[in-house]
Image (cartoon, rainbow, N blue to C red):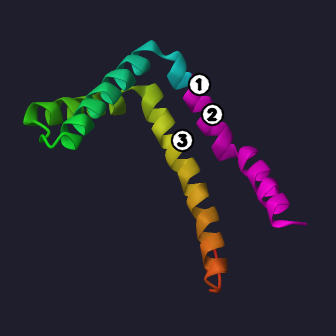
Amino acid sequence: MSIKEKAEQLAEEIVESNEYDDLKAAEEEMQADEAAQEILQEFQSKQKMAQMAQMNGQGVTEEMQQEIQGLQAKMQQNEKIKGYMEAQQEFNGIMEQVNEVISTAIQGQEQPQQA
């Protein structure tokens, strides 16, 4: 089996994982929630404004920082966004494990045993 075929097989296993299913379901729920979408759009807008200010050599104002922090708090309070973020963390954990296994093998080190 070629490396590409093994990578495709790994990708299939990842897509079939519970973590991936949970992530996709949480994403769909979050996208269907109007309140969540409003919060996310406002957060992304404020974040872009802050990035533009920094790119133009301007500092991010204290007011803008407070607005962004307030939106982050709103995101944590919204159950759909919170569920998505938790599912994303779980999925990222799986991807980190995959990357660790590959990196360890490439470096020629022995893979630590999972508990």
- Dots 2, 1 in contact, CB < 8 A: yes
| Picture quadrant where residue 63 is located | top left
Q: Is residue 52 left or right of residue 35?
A: left
In the rendered image, is residue 115 in sight? no
Residue at the location (26% across, 28% down)?
46
Q: Secondary structure at mark 1?
A: helix
Q: CA distance from mark 2 to mark 1?
A: 6 Å
Q: Secondary structure at mark 2?
A: helix
Residue that sits furthest to the bottom in the current view: 109
Residue 7: mark in rendering: none
Residue that sits furthest to the top in the current view: 34
Q: In the rendered image, which residue does mark 2 sit on? A: 24
Q: Is residue 29 left or right of residue 55?
A: right
Q: CA distance from mark 2 to mark 3?
A: 9 Å
Q: Is residue 76 left or right of residue 113?
A: left
Q: In the rendered image, which residue does mark 1 sit on? A: 28
Range covered by the magenta-colored residues: 1-28
Mark 2 or mark 3: name the one nearer the start of the chain: 2
Residue 87: mark in rendering: 3
Within 10 Å of disc 3 (Cα), the crowding (few <14, some 14-19, many 20+) is: many
Residue at the location (65% across, 86% down)?
108
The quarter in which the N terminus is drawn is: bottom right
Residue 19 within the segment the image draws in magenta:
yes
Amino acid type assigned to the residue bearing label 2 in the image: Lys
